[in-house]
């Protein structure tokens, strides 16, 4: 069943790529992520980073899958540990799939305003100050955002809500679900 869904999705994306406006978007950005924590602690988001890119298919309405290497960081204070405060750092691969609409202009315009949203997956590759064996290595989320395109440059702002807990053992949750604010900028190259 998974293979059938994958093949249908790949066929759909390939069809869109052949028939629609295609825009390649190399991207860099910053993020602020915090994790919900237990009642004995507090979590405050710190600035992280991402680098990667996406490909948008379509003009007025579009679909935009992407892939990014992401570093997320949160400062924790916990009364139950010998360390009063520490930074929880998670690095990994984020794969968002945005569905959007150009409210002003379209993919070929020199100026456009966009709204978008969709699902995302985050695959943990490494951690600092968190035991990797205690966390789920795959996180699922939903995001929504807005973007502006000016000539060959774009700026996107989006907010993501985690659907899965960071920690495996939910009876002793220290790291719950994450919430991330993303600011991305880059260049856009139209192929059609």
Image (spheres, grey):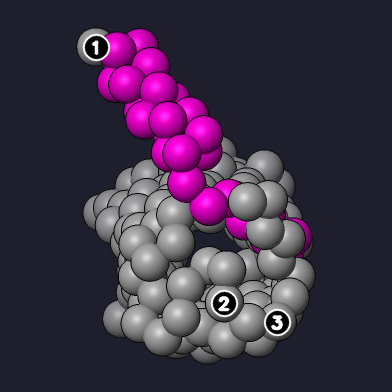
Q: Which residues are magenta?
A: 2-27
- Find disc 2 in the rendering and name its residue: 109
- Magenta stretch: dominant secondary structure: helix
Q: Looking at the image, is mark 2 or mark 3 earlier in the sequence?
A: 2
Q: Residue at x 51, y 83 (%)?
A: 112
Is 127 in front, or is 155? 155
- Find disc 1 in the rendering and name its residue: 1
**Gap between marks 3 and 1 measured at Cα:** 43 Å
In the rendered view, does 176 fall on the left or right side of 135?
left
For residue 77, say whether it is visible: no
Q: Looking at the image, is mark 3 or mark 1 earlier in the sequence?
A: 1
For residue 171, say whether it is visible: yes
- Quarter residue 5 falls in: top left
9 magenta-colored: yes
The answer to whether mark 3 and mark 1 are in CB contact below 8 A is no
**Gap between marks 2 and 1 measured at Cα:** 40 Å
- Find disc 3 in the rendering and name its residue: 151
Q: Looking at the image, is mark 2 or mark 1 earlier in the sequence?
A: 1
Is 60 in front, or is 127? 60
In the rendered view, does 93 fall on the left or right side of 113?
right
Q: Residue at x 40, y 75 (%)?
A: 102
């Amino acid at each position: 069943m998974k293979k059938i869904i994958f093949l249908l999705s790949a066929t759909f994306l390939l069809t869109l790529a052949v028939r629609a406006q295609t825009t390649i978007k190399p991207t860099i950005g910053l993020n602020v992520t915090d994790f919900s924590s237990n009642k004995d602690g507090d979590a405050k988001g710190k600035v992280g980073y991402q680098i990667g890119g996406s490909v948008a298919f379509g003009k007025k309405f579009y679909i935009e899958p992407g892939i990014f290497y992401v570093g997320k960081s949160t400062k924790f204070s916990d009364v139950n540990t010998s360390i009063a405060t520490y930074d929880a750092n998670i690095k990994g691969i984020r794969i968002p799939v945005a569905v959007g609409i150009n409210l002003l202009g379209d993919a070929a315009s020199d100026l456009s305003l966009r709204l978008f949203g969709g699902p995302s997956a985050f695959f943990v590759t490494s951690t600092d100050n968190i035991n990797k064996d205690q966390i789920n290595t795959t996180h699922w989320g939903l995001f929504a955002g807005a973007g502006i395109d000016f000539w060959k440059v774009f700026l996107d702002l989006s907010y993501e809500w985690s659907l899965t807990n960071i920690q495996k053992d939910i009876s002793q949750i220290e790291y719950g679900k994450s919430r991330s604010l993303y600011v991305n900028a880059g260049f856009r190259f139209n192929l059609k």
